[in-house]
Image (spheres, rainbow, N blue to C red):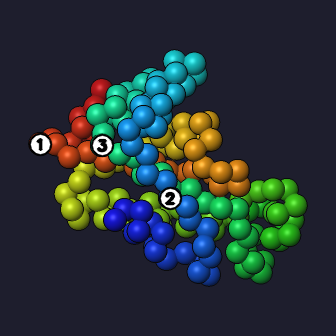
């Protein structure tokens, strides 16, 4: 349901720029192990903490965006003159990033409607990028692990 919410969330000019992956089982173990190694490699303690959260989750929903220019004349959000210049520099349209935010909110809200604990994590998204979980041309911007337990594992963390 979270994936459906993300895919059907409103998007800029109706662009189909959102992709969703659901990770569980062995792929989730690989994700948490890589998160921990990034934390150790880069000296980022919260990656190690978040890796433990992933190990105790039942799944992770990843939400990414395809590179698509919105074609909004004179928008000036991406710091390029126009969409053609943005594309020439192989950059992301700012509206792709906005669309990921909207899709992420829709997915997290859907989980909460069913009382499923969740937390949006940058560390998960960065790790998914390093693992190449999405095909080339899609950047993963958010990761949402989910858990069902008597107390949320994503809060009161150290």
Q: Which residue is mark 3?
A: 58
132 vs 47: above or below: below
Q: Position of residue 88 (x, y in %)?
A: 88, 61
Q: Residues within 10 Å of mark 1 (few under 14, many from 20)?
A: few
Which residue corresponds to the image point at 44% horizontal and 60% vertical from the top-left? 104
Q: Position of residue 115 (x, y in %)?
A: 19, 57
| Observer-nearest of 3 and 91 | 3
Q: Secondary structure at mark 2?
A: strand
Which residue corresponds to the image point at 23% horizontal and 65% vertical from the top-left? 113
Closer to the observer: label 1 or label 2? 2
41 vs 4: above or below: above
Task: Give the numbered dot on residue 45.
Answer: none
Cβ atoms at labels 1 and 3 below 8 Å apart: no
Cβ atoms at labels 3 and 2 below 8 Å apart: no
Which residue corresponds to the image point at 65% horizontal and 55% vertical from the top-left? 138
Looking at the image, residue 18 sits to the left or right of residue 120; the answer is: right
Task: Give the numbered dot on residue 20.
Answer: 2
Q: Which residue occupies the extreme left position in the image?
A: 150
Q: Position of residue 120 (x, y in %)?
A: 40, 49
Whether residue 50 appears in this view of the structure is: no
Q: Secondary structure at mark 3?
A: loop
Q: Which residue is mark 1?
A: 150
61 vs 93: above or below: above
Quadrant including the C terminus: top left
Quadrant including the N terminus: bottom left
Mark 1 or mark 2: name the one nearer the start of the chain: 2
In which quarter of the view is residue 132 placed? top right
């Amino acid at each position: 349901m979270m994936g459906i919410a993300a895919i059907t969330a409103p998007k800029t000019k109706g662009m189909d720029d959102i992709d969703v992956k659901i990770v569980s089982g062995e792929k989730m173990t690989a994700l948490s192990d890589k998160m921990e190694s990034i934390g150790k490699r880069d000296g980022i303690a919260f990656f190690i903490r978040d890796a433990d959260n992933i190990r105790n989750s039942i799944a992770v929903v990843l939400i990414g965006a395809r590179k698509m220019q919105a074609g909004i004349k004179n928008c000036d959000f991406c710091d390029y003159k126009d969409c053609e210049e943005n594309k020439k520099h192989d950059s992301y349209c700012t509206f792709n990033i906005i669309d990921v935010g909207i899709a992420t909110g829709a997915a997290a809200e859907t989980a909460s409607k069913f009382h499923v604990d969740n937390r949006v994590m940058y560390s998960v998204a960065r790790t998914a990028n390093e693992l190449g979980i999405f095909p080339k041309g899609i950047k993963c911007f958010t990761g949402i692990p989910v858990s069902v337990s008597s107390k949320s594992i994503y809060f009161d963390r150290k």
